Image: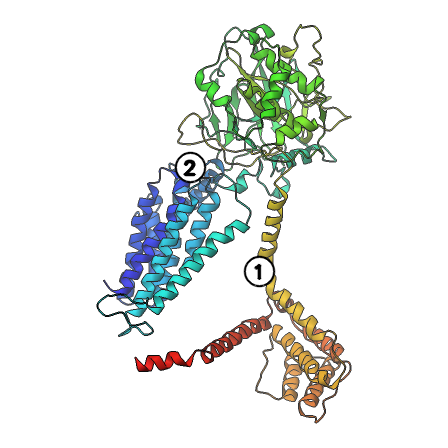
Amino acid sequence: MSGRARLALCAWAATLMAACALLPLVDPATWILQAAVLLAVQTGVGAVARRVPLARPLTIGAQALVTLMLLTLVFARQQAVAGLLPGPQAVQRFADLFQQGGDDIARYAIPAPLESDGIRLMLVGGVLVIGLLVDALAVSFRSAAPAGLPLLALYSVAAGLSEGGADWLWFLVAAAGYLMLLLAEGRDRLSQWGRVFGGAARAPGTGQGRALAPVRTGRRIGAFALGIALVVPLALPAMDGGLLDGARGGVGPGGGGGGTISAVNPLVSLRDSLNVNEDREVLTLRTDSANLSDLYLRIVSLDDFDGTTWKPSKRHITAVPDGTFPTPAGLGRDVERTEIRSLISAADDFAQDWLPMPYPPSAVRVAGNWRYEPVGMTLVGDHGQNTRGLTYEVRSLSLQPTAQQLAAAPQPSAALLREYTELPDSLPDVVARTAREVTAGAANPYEQAVKLQEYFAVNGGFEYDTQVDIGSGSDAIARFLKEKEGFCVHFSFAMAAMARSLGIPARVAVGFAPGSPQADGSVSVGLRDAHAWPEVYFEGVGWTRFEPTPTRGSTPAYTITDQPGSSVPDPALPSRNPQTEPSAAPSESDACSPQDKKLDACATESAVAVPVTGGGGPPWYALLGWVLAGLVVLAVPLAPLLWRLRVRALRLGAHGRGEADAGPHTLAVWRELTDTAWDLGIRPEESQTTRRAAARLVRLGRLDPAAAAAVHRVADAVEQVLYAPRPRLTAGLTEDVRLASAGLRATAGRTTRLRARIAPRSAVRVAWAVSARWAALKRRAAAARPVWRGTSDQQG
């Protein structure tokens, strides 16, 4: 095998080894076999093209063309010309698949299902693109070191999205592939020489000796690169998240572009929604319900709790059932119920991916692409579908269970208990201890739940406050129980966690509290009506709403007991209290990835995770890290501009007044003038005299008489310090340079001026200076090399 073919094989292997970091993101991982085959074909085409030989650009072009045809054959065969050639329909198919893949990435948690053609195209296509770059750099251009950049990009994407603890293993695999590629290139280069220079002699008969110089250098480079790759991530903030962290930031699209309501961090965004100066109407509804105080509009339920975050579990989603929905889980026939109809209209700036509905829904008439999640009985938009400007009709059940039915509820199934009473070990003991103290004397789970509700809403001394900053982490609920201040998120999360500690199945619902009746008979639901509340499961009744948040929503009638001394308030509390800030929950949603599934293995899963930390946001050091990282990212493209401003300030700044200062100052201002002209497109001519250079600058810059005179005064000063026996300072040179520079900018176009400011051409002097210093350093190192080494080499 030739050295070039061996290098191509190593590039193929290195790409696949780096792609292994993507394996935990998708289940099953069989996609990598398909990627390996297609990548082998791509590599083979490159090998054949170089064998012909074709020029490097033609080789890369041939590989890119074959790659596109392979992807067309696999993903868009029916839309392609002759099943292979990509035409307009195939291009549209790719666009649809990429859009689908983007939606699925935002919808699914890790590992995402491979059944999604969009995700599979993004995986396979991404690996092929990285493989093409690696092959082009390492093989076509015979430069393996820069090929590590696309490999690093591939690994970094996987490491940033992965939630597993085996990232170090995938790093070692990817690093081994890169080092193998470097070794193959070094071996290929050395094979072109008749013998290796610089290696020490080996001991006779032992085969031992010092490693060859290129090998030693390679080891040092490899060790240094691995060390940097291991140490640098420790200085950066950790990336948490599902398939895409940006989608996990909340229940909205994040950026809030286009005037839509957005929620990036639920705690912060909910508090911001409650504190808006002007409440914004997001939904209007007309209903035949006789009890508007119980008409909560539910968006999604959060049933997975890890100690710091509540989020939806990964669930199987199906087509929206035709006709009537299945009976809600756990609902028995003896529970009184009434079916109500509600016509709901969403505002044009309310783009929620989940369909707000009364719970439990029995039928929905809605236009667009919607999917049904059976466990939560929710509808989620598919392929970008949302509620923006949507009008839909919902039939739902208004349930009226009695306190006796709830108190006599039998034990739920073991599977349901196991899932909905799960608590992390990191939860502070004070949570369970407080729950036991509050519910002391309760005879059954129903009485325990009522006592928890009363503790938070009435007799526990808690206050509703949207400005409170409880903090984050596993101790957030403990701090809330101590400080006794918070808003609906804190109350609902704390009650659900405490209920679970007592063995009562509980989860948290997110949506809207009952809105405000209007004169025309409609109900207006505003941004401030966003809310979160706990739901407790009772066998025979199903998931049942409780309301622990004081002054928010309405207290359910079935939680008002006949026991003496019960202090539960009137259930007909208004949904809004003008004296206090309204309640909270995500206002608008974009798909956020759900987390680890709890029950079913699923081919498709429900969308949106609503991670909610236990307090007011990420820790300060994470914020500081991201701020510093953002500053670094901004500084890179702005570096030429910043360097130019600094150099200009130094050249035109204060200077000494002695004769020794005349030369450096005058030459500095002249260099500033010529560099300004260079930035504006007038390249300096170093071979010309100062006077000719000044005349050329005046001519090409089309300067007016005043600016031209300033240029000539600076040039005269330069000649004076260069040739006069005793150089002297010339007054006003800084002002002359500024006047001449203003004249140059006045005659330049807007685009030229913008480029001169953002990407000044004279910034190349930095590279020249670095190159000159490097050359000088090598010369000094060569001069300092011990003479005895050369003598011993000659004697040997």
Task: Decide which of 559, 39 is in the foreground and name it.
Answer: 559
Q: Position of residue 354 (x, y in %)?
A: 54, 30
Q: Which residue is mark 1?
A: 636
Disc with the residue nearer the chain's start (1 vs 2): 2
Residue 759's quadrant in the figure?
Answer: bottom right
Q: Secondary structure at mark 1?
A: helix
Q: Position of residue 378 (x, y in %)?
A: 52, 25
Q: Is residue 696 above or below residue 72?
A: below
Residue 544's quadrant in the figure?
Answer: top right
Instruction: In the displayed orientation, state which residue is furthest to the left.
Output: 205
Q: Position of residue 448 (x, y in %)?
A: 60, 14
Q: Amino acid at mark 1?
A: Val
Find the distance from the CA under tag 1 to the CA under tag 2: 35 Å
Task: Determine if residue 85 is in view.
Answer: no
Q: Secondary structure at mark 2?
A: loop
* Residue 111 numbered tag: 2
Residue 388's quadrant in the figure?
Answer: top right
Task: Determine if residue 429 is in view.
Answer: yes
Q: Using residue 373 as the reference point, say whether residue 626 is left or right of it.
A: right
